[in-house]
Image (spheres, grey):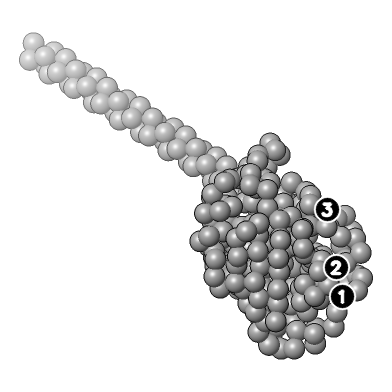
Amino acid sequence: MASSKNQEREAREARERLKRYNARQAVHSHQIKRRKRDNLFAVIGVVIVAALATVTQIFYFSAGPGMPTPEPSASASSTAAATENVGDVPDPSLAEDRTWTGEMTLNSTVLGYELDGAAAPQAVSAFVQEVEDGYFIDKTCHRLVDDSVAGLLQCGSIDGTGAADPDFSFGPIENASTDGVYPAGTIAMARIADQPYSQGRQFFIVFNDAQLPDDSVGGYTIIGQVTSGLEDLKTDIIAGGYEDDGTQQNTGTPSIATSITRLTIE
């Protein structure tokens, strides 16, 4: 009898051990499946983030300042990549390696500004020539990008749409930001993405610190800065917002129609 009871007890203990073993195996298997699932979700998350980053970069560089319905990578629409100056581009010596000062009036808002002819001689020479020739008067500011993206106002398009002027373009890129940051008040040249010789008469004014990533040819030529009136610009024009045409987010034509009514330089 005693032997039979011992055998039953051993069998019962064996069953309990097997049950505990199976339970541990089930838990272990569940943990492995959960880790695999979590790793899969993590990989999917990384892929989504990378895809969004890529889309953001494409969005920046395929529709920068200058496009007919733009966004900032600072551009002007065209199809062929230029590799040399086109049109009556002045010699860089016109900038005289000095600081130029003047006033720019947008509607009735007066901005004081200065240009650095030493840092960006080709672009400043082109700007000075166009001011002296009267090109900018009555040209519109066709594009406003809100500060959730960059915070800039773009002006100077030949036809008011942001289209490039096929008869006037130049390069190279000069005095671009080294870290992609363009501080509030920066005045820089618009251009087509990936085309250093596509700068023309369009420029943009940064009204809040902007981060503009470089494209394959670098950043954007900084010609100078606003020295006074920037807060008035924000109050008088920027605060009015923009007309969203549905083609791009965070950018459009200023709701307050804006044009250059006066521009001096000395």
Identify the residue shown where x is 57% and y is 56%.
151
Q: Which residue is mark 3?
A: 159
Q: Looking at the image, is mark 3 or mark 2 earlier in the sequence?
A: 3
Q: Looking at the picture, how far across and down is residue 38, in whole percent?
A: 45, 38
Which of the two marks, 3 or 1, is nearer to us in this view? 3
Q: Looking at the picture, how far across and down is residue 41, in whole percent?
A: 50, 37
Residue type indicated by callout 3: Asp
Q: Secondary structure at mark 3?
A: loop
Foreground pick, 170 / 266: 266
Assess whether mark 2 and mark 1 are in contact (beta carbons under 8 angstroms): yes
Classify residue 209 as left or right of residue 26: right
Q: Looking at the picture, how far across and down is residue 82, in whole percent?
A: 88, 66
Vertical comparison of 207 with 121: above or below: above
Residue type indicated by callout 1: Val
Q: Secondary structure at mark 1?
A: loop
Q: Which residue is mark 1?
A: 89
Q: Please tell me in which quadrant of the rendered image residue 101 appears.
A: bottom right
Quadrant of the rendering where the N terminus is positioned: top left
